[in-house]
Amino acid sequence: MRLTKFVTIVGMTLTLSGTAAFAEGFEIHDLTTLEKAVAAKFDKEAYHWATPTNMSISCCGMDEDEIVSVTLDRQTDEIGKANRTDEAYIAELEDVCTKQGICKIEEIEAGTAIARQVTLRNLGGGQSGVNIFAVKGGDRLTIQSSAKTTEIARDNAVKVLEALKGSLIGL
């Protein structure tokens, strides 16, 4: 009888501690629930699909050469798969961008998350790219946008961020 009570208490404690840690991250953990809100920011002809952790939008204009990919995951140190702090992730991102000199990085506003916008000058094939990384409580949102110009890529990435900011990240 005591063993059953002990197992129940330990199980409840682990459940509650896991829930508390997860609750510190994003408000929602399923991109399918936000697909329509994101798609509404683009042309009606834009092709889009979503799974709980990924979303893709192929769009816009006459050339249909603009692509936005969205990924929702937990940021880890990759080696031991341990969660790392949001600040450490951003510091590493800034360090790589600065040392490599291949991108421009700037802080952007993303509700209650820490966020950076990374501009990639040349993706090849005449495409430019803008990525937005937002982290909160170990959750990571990555928005990757490519288009013919940096301005278009940035506009598309920001459209997605604006559509996700309130519901996913939290204001």
Image: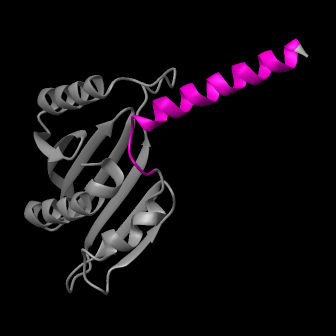
Along the viewing direction, whichever of 84 and 14 lies nearer the viewer = 14
The residue at the point 40 percent across, 69 percent down is 35
* Number of numbered tags placed on the structure image: 0
Q: Quadrant of the N terminus?
A: top right
Snapshot quadrant of residue 34: bottom left
In magenta, the rendered stretch is 2-28
Q: Is residue 21 above or below residue 130?
A: above
The x, y position of residue 168, in whole percent, is: 35, 53
The x, y position of residue 165, in whole percent, is: 26, 54
The residue at the point 20 percent across, 86 percent down is 62
Q: Which residue lies furthest to the top in this view?
A: 2
Along the viewing direction, whichever of 74 and 22 lies nearer the viewer = 22
Q: Which colour scheme is used?
A: one colour
The residue at the point 12 percent across, 45 percent down is 108
The residue at the point 72 percent across, 20 percent down is 9
Q: Residue furthest right?
A: 1
Whether 22 is among the magenta residues is yes
Q: Is residue 127 visible?
A: no
The x, y position of residue 97, in whole percent, is: 17, 33
